[in-house]
Image (cartoon, rainbow, N blue to C red):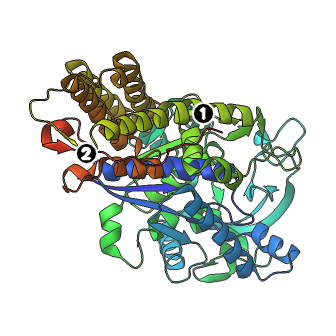
Amino acid sequence: MQHRLIATSIPYMNAGPHMGHAMEFIIADILARYNRSSGNDTFFLTGADEHGSKIYNKAQELEKETLEMLDENVELFNTLHTALHTTPDEFIRTTDQVRHWPTAQAIWRKLETKGDIYKKKYSGLYCEGCEVFMPEKDLDSEGNCPIHHKKPLLLEEENYFFRLSKYEEQLKKIISNDTVKIVPEFRKNEILSFLSEGLNDVSFSRSADKMPWGIPVPGDETQVMYVWCDALTNYLSGIGYSFDQEKFNRYYPTYLHVIGKDISRFHAIIYMAMLLSADMETSKNILVHGFVTSAGEKMSKSLGNVVVPEDVINVYGADALRYFITVGGGGVGEDIDYTQTGFHNLYNSGLVNGLGNIANRTSTLFCKYYPDGISTDGFVLDSEIDKEIKFSYGRYITSLDVFDLRIGYISVSTLIDLANKYFDEEKPWTIKDDPEKLRHILLNLVEILYHITILVAPFLPQTAEKMREIFSLTDSKLASFSIDPDFRLTRESKDIKLVTVPLLFEKK
């Protein structure tokens, strides 16, 4: 058993959640569930980034107390987690003065003691949307921020800086040799390309007069921490850095960061450099995902193409959205394009006609002819089916260990397709007069369905729960549904009884 911390980035709380947040939560939750079912002690961390001028100004605009607005937005994110059936073990808030602030301030002092924080006057282009200073080379051809499409402000301040440039060579080394493994490979190459251009030191604080909503800099209350030491330290405070040393030692260092492509530099470069400066072990893996687009375009309120996660869930269910995020795109880290037609077709083909169909057909026929169950005495699983189950487990484990959710689910689909094909070819509904042959066919189908139930669980937790009910197992070992490529239900159980459950998916 390994101890593994899986963490999302912490969303900025100036507004409620959108489809990109849902995507990130789903990816992290699937990998957390997979690791738990594989026997790893897994801690799933998320939270809220709650400081900065943008949040303070938004609250002023809404004529609300800042914390009041934040509490409302945090509740929206918690509601989304419930709707998605994502199950974080901790939701850390950067406004938490008991658990988070002491961690941020302790890390600041570590970096300061190392000689890596210094104060200087600085003039630069500042994007209020990104809340970062931007070099001119990162602006678009019209001099605008490429994300927010607005010209950055020219600001001159005296702030604290972090000696990021000091760690340039170390960062190149640990990323090149996969000490910090960035997935997919093309995102790793982007980071290395950026590093090859050379690093500048980064602003590490803002004047409290200009950004009054933040964590005070230790020993200088005229300054508040900038986002780097304020927000990135959530990965430490969220597992008890300043208040639960046992938990911290158990889960540190981070096994996996799940982050969007727009903030990959912040994590792969600035956060890793902070850990190096603090003489702490760096994170193991960074999974960089793409965006959810709408009919090929970035979702935008001005374009009227925003897809609200809850709207999709209300019609199709949470597992349908989880399925779409898993298989709806291309390779690891690529964007996923949402269209209503595409989503609808994917739902009907993969869930209704695929998984739902075989679960319903198998359990219905089984209960029709064997309502009291079947003995497994003398049954031998077909060798081709046994081989396919082993192959699917192997590909499933290999894929999810490198965070490839799509190929991981294709391993499940292989078994779903196998079962549907076997059902169609053997036509068990036509051989009721040959009970031994019917028993053999149904036990083969039951074995496949049992393993589908296990493997689909991280992806579609609600569906897997309903599928477990089909088996009505009482033996704790059989009912554990743990990932075990060598386990066979028809070998370990003397008798098998199924029950019918409502359709897993209604056709839309």
Whether residue 267 is visible, yes or no, is no
Marks 1,2: beta carbons within 8 A: no
Cα–Cα gap, marks 1 and 2: 29 Å
212 shown above or below 332: below
Q: In the image shown, does 36 or 125 lie closer to the viewer?
A: 36
Q: Which residue is mark 2?
A: 497
Element assignment for label 2: loop
- State the residue at coordinates (48%, 45%): 286
| 43 to the left or right of 214 | left
x and y percentages locating residue 328 in the rendered image: 60, 33
The residue carrying pointer 2 sits among few (fewer than 14), some (14 to 19) or many (20 or more) residues within 10 Å by Cα, namely some
The residue carrying pointer 1 sits among few (fewer than 14), some (14 to 19) or many (20 or more) residues within 10 Å by Cα, namely some
- Looking at the rendered structure, which numbered label has been put on residue 251? none
74 shown above or below 130: below
Element assignment for label 1: helix
Quadrant where the C terminus lies?
top right
Residue furthest to the left in view is: 378
Whether residue 127 is visible, yes or no, is yes
Q: Which residue is mark 1?
A: 348
Residue furthest to the front in view is: 433
Q: Amino acid at mark 1?
A: Asn
Q: Quadrant of residue 365?
A: top left
Q: Quadrant of residue 76?
A: bottom right
x and y percentages locating residue 13 in the rendered image: 69, 66
x and y percentages locating residue 451 in the rendered image: 31, 37
- State the residue at coordinates (56%, 79%): 96
| 265 to the left or right of 501 | right
x and y percentages locating residue 195 in the rendered image: 57, 39
Q: Amino acid at mark 2?
A: Lys
- State the residue at coordinates (29%, 23%): 388
